[in-house]
Amino acid sequence: MSGPVEPVVYANVADAARCLAGVAHRTPVLTSTTVDARCGARVFFKCENFQRVGAFKFRGAYNALSRLDAGQRRAGVVAFSSGNHAQAVALAGRLLGIGATIVMPSSAPAVKLEATRGYGATVVTYDPRTENREQIARDLANRQGLTVIPPFDHPDIVAGQGTAAQELIEDAGPLDYLLVPCGGGGLISGCAIAANHLSPGVKVIGVEPAAGDDVTRSFASGTLQSVHNPDTIADGARTASAGAVTFPLILHHVHAMTTVTDEELLRAMFFVWERMKILVEPTGALGIAALLEGKIDARGKRIGIIVSGGNVDLRAVAAYL
């Protein structure tokens, strides 16, 4: 008997790569002799902080919007996001001629609010303490006939995000470990699908902030867990839980989950700023922190790390300093 049909397989990632060719940046894979010496490993950083809008989110957003039919394109789309998906949908919409409305928390980093408006989207803010962003988006969709583009729980989003790992392995070669930041699971599920196909034997490990460890707990229990408005500097990983699409994919394709504290995140983020001279946001540093803090035994291994974004609110960073 055959099992259930998976919503995303490697063929979908490969198709997304063709869709994104010449539109998304093929971001660099960087190395650091300092990091290699410190960890006793060969480490490859896939720098999605150099992606359009400064984060991997452009991959999934453009892949999803490009597949809308003519009627959906005319009506427009609505998305909800703390910032990077917001910017990605706004830019993808502008490139494809599709109007975009974005529901964003009033507490989102100012740099992300400003950039989203700058790409031409209409921004609707809400109070995350008292309002539900998904419900606001559904209400807008119903009133205006918009198509909802969720930040992670959608097959086309997952497939698009998986192209980051595909490019990393094409450029760096086979890996022993792949460390991936995890919020709602779109990036890690897509990357795990690509990595397992292209680098058999790789161990894919998701990394969450300790205050927002819902996927880590879900992975351990096999049942979906949630967290409400977690208090962490990793604003891109403040999602309440994985989704109906992403959670089964994580259970099937990911090998382990781990967490890092905000203090560990800050150490990793500033280390990369100072030693590698690249700007990484807190969420983007999750995988780096897991490596530098010894969450895996990296000695003698080939390690890939998805650096998911670089949209830093410098005013917030001044407070961290």
Image (cartoon, grey):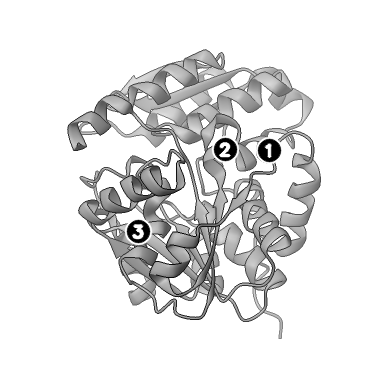
Q: Place residue 279 in its image quadrant.
A: top left
Q: Residue placed farthest to the bottom in the image? A: 1
Q: Residue at x 63, y 58 (%)?
A: 165
Gap between marks 1 and 3 measured at Cα: 25 Å
Instruction: Say few, some or many: other residues with alpha carbon within 10 Å of mark 2 (under 14 / 14 to 19 / 20 or more).
Output: many
Q: Secondary structure at mark 3?
A: helix
Query: Compared to 206, does 128 lie above or below?
Result: above
Whether residue 214 is visible here, answered yes or no, is yes
Q: Residue 261: which disc?
A: none
79 sits to left or right of 219:
right
Q: Residue at x 62, y 17 (%)?
A: 99
Precedes in sequence: disc 1 or disc 3: 1
Q: Residue at x 38, y 55 (%)?
A: 286
| Residue wearing tag 3 | 289
In the image, 48 versus 100, the foreground residue is 48
Residue 124: x and y, percent?
Answer: 40, 18
Residue 259: x and y, percent?
Answer: 31, 63
Kindly check if marks 1 and 3 are in contact, taking CB atoms under 8 A apart as contact.
Answer: no
Q: Residue 25: which disc?
A: 1
In the image, 33 versus 59, the foreground residue is 33
Kindly check if marks 2 and 1 are in contact, taking CB atoms under 8 A apart as contact.
Answer: yes
Kindly check if marks 3 and 2 are in contact, taking CB atoms under 8 A apart as contact.
Answer: no
Instruction: Say few, some or many: other residues with alpha carbon within 10 Å of mark 1 (under 14 / 14 to 19 / 20 or more).
Output: some
Q: Amino acid at mark 3?
A: Ala
Q: Quadrant of the C terminus?
A: top left
Precedes in sequence: disc 2 or disc 1: 1
Q: Amino acid at mark 2?
A: Phe
Q: Amino acid at mark 1?
A: His
| Residue wearing tag 2 | 50
In the image, 227 versus 175, the foreground residue is 175
Q: Secondary structure at mark 2?
A: helix
